[in-house]
Image (tube, grey):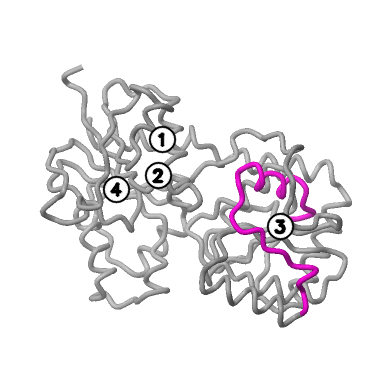
Amino acid sequence: MSNQKSVFLETHNINNRAGGLGTFNYELIKGFSELNFDEMRLTLNASDTKLLENEFGKKFDYNKYSSLSRLEFFRIRKNYDLWHSVNQNTKVEPFRCKNYLLTIHDVNFTEEVSSDINHKRNKLFIKKLNKATAITYISEFSKKQAHKYFTIPNVPEYIIHNGNPISSLMDTSSYISEVPIDKPFFYTIGDFIERKNYGSIINMMKLIKDYNLIISGNNFKKYGEEIKELIDKNNLKNQVFLTGKVSNQGKQFYMKNCTAFLFPSIREGFGLPPIEAMSFGKPTFLSDKTSLPEIGGNVSNYWTNFDPEYMKSIVLEGLNNHEKNKTENEILIKNRAALFDWKVAATNYLKVYQEILF
């Protein structure tokens, strides 16, 4: 169709499924693949285009990502009708484009790197903002946070929640855990960076002897080393276990078999793991910071501070309440998780494309 509008999705980190942005890229594209958009032609940017082509076929066009395209001289020259910058951190920008949609996940860099408007990280972000024809946010919180630190241009703004990455429950019966699971355990998963705040739940575990704690994620980082030292210092080697990175089957195994899911993160633009855990009807314990109350709603339990005694009391009280009406509570928790759907998210992004282009 010659009058199709051309849309470029800057999805080059789609191959890093271990991270939140890679998951976002992949799940959004998978959501698009289930929809009809005959009036548009979508091009995906990826280093391994063959992998995507094998999965999605002719539904999309594909552009082979080169790291050189981050440099101004080597930017993509084709003048797309719409360029979708699918996260605020990407350095891949168009040489020119007719319309520019920016998706903001968070502006945590203002709190973790610098809030100085002249810092190069913030300058890069301001350039994106000033280019935007429209802006989407993944949560109310990320919109509020962006408005707090930056002057947002007067363009249409939309909030589109992410979906749940667990679209189907896997058979985990063949999975063999590399850490002990002979005792009831709490579970958490995520990147080993300071804002995940794992230290708080490790300090809490000193006071809870009836449960173990299992943490998944790449722990070969500075914060990972700090967490290992904290486990050693508190003599918790037989109670707190680090699995390292796990497969999807492994993640689902631990979520399915844990007593509760803990997520004490102090900064999240969205926070996918709590939704995944809720798919299994598990009681979730979250920090009340940033976007997490948007995710957990009224079916989760919240910590307002990280004093170990206080955290322990919230967990034991929450577990007690969960057990009183276990069947009913599990249904409510699973229903909450079902509200977050990638096909719905993809439909909403397509509507934004249409509003910009037609």
Looking at the rendered structure, the secondary structure element under dot 2 is helix
Q: What's under tag 3, amino acid-wise? A: Tyr
Cα separation between marks 2 and 3:
26 Å
Q: Mark 2 and mark 1 in contact? Answer it, CB < 8 Å.
A: yes
Q: Residue at x 33, y 46 (%)?
A: 12
Q: Position of residue 149 (x, y in %)?
A: 34, 70
Pick whichever of labels 2 and 3 is earlier in the sequence.
2
Question: Which numbered mark, 2 or 1, is in the foreground of this view?
Answer: 2
- Label located before the other in sequence (1 or 3): 1
Q: CA distance from mark 4 to mark 1?
A: 14 Å
Q: Amino acid at mark 2?
A: Ile
The amino acid on which the numbered mark 4 sits, given as a three-letter code, is Ser
Give the label, 4 or 2, closer to the camera: 2
Local crowd at mark 4 within 10 Å, few (<14), some, or many (≥20)? many
- The residue identified by callout 3 is 187
Residue 14 is tagged as: 2
The residue under the point 38% across, 22% down is: 36
Per the image, the residue denoted by label 1 is 29
Q: CA distance from mark 1 to mark 3?
A: 29 Å
Q: Magenta stretch containing residue 286, yes or no? A: no
Q: Residue at x 22, y 54 (%)?
A: 70
Q: Residues within 10 Å of mark 2 (few under 14, many from 20)?
A: many
The residue pinned by badge 4 equals 85
Residue at image point 45% right, 33% down: 30
Q: Give the CA distance from mark 4 to mark 3.
A: 33 Å
